[in-house]
Image (spheres, rainbow, N blue to C red):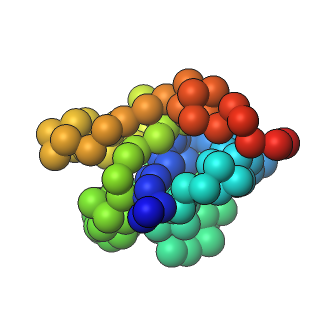
Amino acid sequence: MKKQKIYLTGGVTRRDTAQIGEFDLVKEKLEKAGFVVTTCVEAMGTDITIYVKKDLSANDFRDIMRKRWQALLESDQVVYLKDWESEHGSLNEVRFSKEVYIPQYEAEKFIEEYCSNVPA
């Protein structure tokens, strides 16, 4: 059986650098449950700390979103962190995934439902 691919999104540029670790924690839980996970941070393909708490130029934003949307389109499901509405990029990703019928789930609820039998 093919492993399900998950695209994990949430606010990035409005976070403190330390909060970026939340992506790693959720990704680890999902991978332990057998999912293949790509985070929006990984999809950006760059050192995320250069974007944290900064205003991006239109060109930078467009380049980042091209990478993120490609990863999103390759996924079977979108899982989002609780602050996904705080960032323009993740807001558009969740909206777009609905338009192309990629199921979306809030991370805590998804983990509770699909990862509850996985050892910590």
Taking depth in this image into account, of 80 and 13 the one nearest to the observer is 80
Quick check: 100 above or below 67? above
Is residue 36 or residue 14 the one in the foreground?
A: 36
Quadrant location of the C terminus? top right
The residue that appears at 51% across and 74% down in the rendered structure is: 45
Residue 16 pos. (x, y %): 70, 44
**Quadrant of the image containing the N terminus:** bottom left
Give residue 95's quadrant in the image: top left
Percent of width and height locating residue 17: 72, 51
Which residue is located at x 49 percent, y 29 percent?
106
For residue 27, above or below residue 85 = below
| Observer able to see residue 81 | yes
The answer, for residue 51, to whether it is visible in the render is no
Residue at image coords 48%, 38%: 80
The answer to which quarter of the image holds residue 111 is top right
Q: Residue furthest front?
A: 1
Q: Nearer the viewer, residue 99 or 58?
A: 99
- Residue 11 spot, x, y in % from top left: 52, 41
Q: Position of residue 85 (x, y in %)?
A: 42, 29
Residue 104 horizontal side relative to residue 95, left or right: right
Instruction: Count how many numbered circles sit on residues in the image.
Output: 0
Residue lying farthest to the left in this orientation: 99
